[in-house]
Image (cartoon, grey):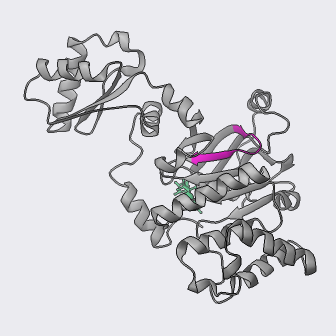
Amino acid sequence: MPTMLEPDAVASTASTAHPEDPIVLSSLTHDYGTRLALDHLSFSVAPAQIFGLLGPNGSGKTTLFRILSTLMVPSGGVATIRGFDVAKEPGQVRQQIGIVFQARSLDIKLTVEENLRHAGHLYGLSGKHLRGRIADVLQRVALTDRARDYVETLSGGMQRRVELAKGLIHSPAVLLLDEPTTGLDPGARLDLWQYLRMLRDEEGVTVLVTTHMMEEAEYCDRLAILSEGKLVALGSPEELKSTIGGDVVLFETDSETAAQSLAARMAGRFDMAALGNGAPAVLGNTVRLERENGHRFLTAVLDAFPGEVRGVSVSRPRLEDVFIQRTGHRFWTEKTDASETQRDHEKGGGHD
Ligand code: ADP
Ligand code: MG
């Protein structure tokens, strides 16, 4: 049953979006039967930005990617790309966007050039113009000298660059990428980000990229953080981290029970009311809180509760802290930790 769009929600978000914003979401919702995968998302993406969609596995990134790339119609709400409605004007939207899927979409038995030529034909390009475009995009991703090579002879990082070139063949103003660095080694990963920055800076391309990796999200100009289909935070990485007060202090204990007991007594002993959102939270066997002068506080706690703490840490806020603060739980649960997700992806898992 499609969710109906609430006029109020649209009106309130429309006022925050600028007319020139190439991507605008208004109360965008999607359900797969009973499962709500996207829950009334409203935000917009400014031109020539690298915009990141950060969320753990199952948070709805691929669902949103598929809707924006016109592969799927949302159950409710509206999304526009350069003014075109993704559900009602998919043909026009496709002319505006380049798409890079999480899974490989190249024919490895063909050469790099042949793959790009086929991609160009799908967009109605041919002849001299297409040859010019192929030369341009290959130069962009520094693969001119590999044009005649079979894709299967290229490294994983090079194949991703061919995917990128393919997404750019028709000179789109907006580039959509779903977890583009999956399975790449750290060097190739940095390399791909370098190309995305170049596209933004030199061609003014608007880039929307999904990722489940916090380190990658740091490279984005602006981020939307998703949790279970809901928008939980929106802003630049710096803005988001600055919403956390002071340092993040962690006390590891022997068990969850011990952590709960310690958190309760800590709250009794120290002035937590003065902390605002920094009240202690229990995450498994760890007590976590936000506090100015974290080192001084840490020493005071260790003195007050000798022998109860097994390990400590004080750090500047990270994006994961933003996620914990907004959702009350860790980015990775025990069930789907980062390494497991990585393995899933390498096996070709996911919904693509
Ligand atoms: P992400 O890309 O962030 O991992 P997805 O968009 O793939 O998230 O999934 C969001 C939610 O929707 C998850 O709970 C997932 O299990 C569910 N889901 C995704 N695709 C389908 C589908 N084709 N049918 C039913 N449920 C789906
Ligand atoms: Mg996904």
Q: Name the main secondary structure of what is drawn in magenta.
A: strand
Bounds of the magenta segment? 43-53
Apparent side of residue 231 relative to residue 271 in the rendered image (left or right) = right
- Is 306 magenta? The answer is no
- Does 199 sit above or below residue 104? above
Coordinates of residue 76 in the picture (x, y in percent): 73, 46
> What residue is drawn where x is 43% and y is 40%?
320
> What residue is drawn where x is 65% and y is 59%?
195
* Number of marks in picture: 0
Coordinates of residue 167 in the picture (x, y in percent): 73, 66
Tell me where residue 282 sits by quadrant. top left
Apparent side of residue 95 relative to residue 258 in the rendered image (left or right) = right
Residue 197 in view: yes
- Residue closer to the observer: 45 or 27: 45
Taking the image as four quarters, which one is ligand 1 found in? bottom right
Coordinates of residue 189 in the picture (x, y in percent): 52, 61
> What residue is drawn where x is 46% and y is 70%?
346
